[in-house]
Amino acid sequence: MLRLHDTSSGALQPVEPTTGPFTMYVCGITPYDATHLGHAATYVTFDLVQRQVRDRGHAVRYVQNVTDVDDPLFERADRDGVDFRDLARREVALFREDMTALAVLPPDAYVGVEESMDGIVEKILALWDAGQAYPLPVPGESSVDVYLDLATEPEFGQVSGWTREEMLAVFADRGGDPDRPGKRDRLDPLLWRGARAGEPTWDGGRLGSGRPGWHIECTAITIDHLGMPFDLKGGGTDLVFPHHEMSAAQAYGLGGGAVFARHYAHQAMVAYEGEKMSKSKGNLVLVSRLRHEGIDPMAIRLVLLAQHYRRDWEYTPSLRADAQDRLARWRAALSGNVAPAPQEAVDGIRACLADDLDSAGALAVVDAWADRALAGEGEDPTAAGVLARTLDALLGVRV
Ligand code: 5CA
Ligand code: ZN
């Protein structure tokens, strides 16, 4: 059984489905800038999950959104004098190229906001009609903003397990508006942003024109593409609160208190130059830049796999050098005619990954086999082929 640390319960839990395909939703990019190593860490982590689940014989249904309607995208498009849709298309194409280079298996559905607008509007109206949402007039405009009324969602708080103080401490920094006059609770999340002069808007039917808030985007896309409950919701730890907490609160409301995600897993933050790597701060190590510098994408993947997904870490060029050395050793070990029998290593890789994705442990297993092969041990002529296929299938490392 694959076991993962579940954010919501704080415990290791088996995540495999009992019937039907494994259903997984991972929060996708906001496509206004290129993929950095933090994004790549998140998508490689959930790629390992997908590979583990498939290795156990289950089908996987994997959905990822693209936040292609959001302020940072509009602001960057304005700054650069381009249409926001063109910017999003360009960055999504680059993201997919980066993911392909890193051997990340693509999601089955890759879903944008604009194409999901009807489903999102329908969910907001359902919450409103059920008395779980309320309007606030937009000052100086004829439109309304619509907020979720958290007082109607008793399950709120279960994903993060945070206190109200902890929530309020980060809410404003993570897209919330605690000081908006008229809100019933400072933490109530925005469901619909009514039209404002100079901003792109969409027809929201009875909501009037405007655009959806961020959290309802992921709630609606999840429900419309996976239903609920589904098996695993993922993203970086920066999304635990408010994004995943609010997405779940809205879904509980829509489902009459039904379970949204059975499990939550989160990738720890990758830092660079002392701070979380983020597009807004600009301290980025871009996957595309490393690729253009001629770094083998498999070495980039090995940089990520050498870290446990639940520990924050900071990128340094020496980690890249280590990964390049490792890749070269593996390639050398796999190029011999005979080598040590592979089964123990194959079992070891599987066991490490099944244990909360201990990818660093799995690399150590391969290192040990490679050391023996390079020392001239072993007589097995099929070993290199078996191990190369295992590395490809389980770790996504193509030697
Ligand atoms: N579009 C939203 C999610 S709906 C978003 O957070 N987009 S993002 O482009 O900012 O991030 C994409 C994914 O990468 C998210 O899952 C996020 O949690 C993750 N991520 C962002 N920065 C880092 C980082 N420094 N380390 C690890 N993961 C990160
Ligand atoms: Zn999301």
Image (cartoon, rainbow, N blue to C red):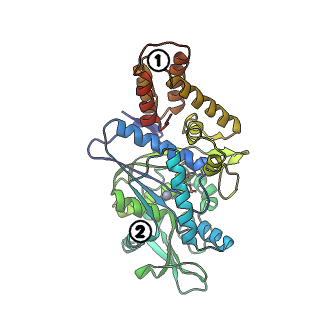
Which sits in the foreground, 173 or 211? 211
Reading the chain from its start, which is encountered first: label 1 or label 2?
Answer: 2
Residue 193 appears at what percent x and percent y?
A: 53, 74
The residue that appears at 73% across and 45% down in the rendered structure is: 273
> Could you tell me which quadrant the N terminus lies in?
top left
Which sits in the foreground, 17 or 240? 17
Crowd class of label 2 (few under 14; some 14 to 19; many from 20; radius 10 Å): some
> Quick one: which residue is furthest to the left in this view?
19
Q: Which three-letter amino acid code belongs to the residue tagged 1?
A: Ala
Residue 162 appears at what percent x and percent y?
A: 54, 49
Question: Mark 2 sits on what residue?
Answer: 116
Mark 1 touching mark 2, by CB under 8 A?
no
The residue that appears at 64% across and 44% down in the rendered structure is: 294
Please tell me whether mark 1 sits on a helix, a strand or a loop: loop
Residue 140 appears at what percent x and percent y?
A: 61, 86
Where on the picture, by quarter, is residue 122?
Answer: bottom left
Indicate whether 142 appears above or below 210. below
Question: Mark 1 sits on what residue?
Answer: 339
The residue that appears at 67% across and 70% down in the rendered structure is: 80
Crowd class of label 1 (few under 14; some 14 to 19; many from 20; radius 10 Å): many
Asked whether residue 389 appears in the rendered view, the answer is yes
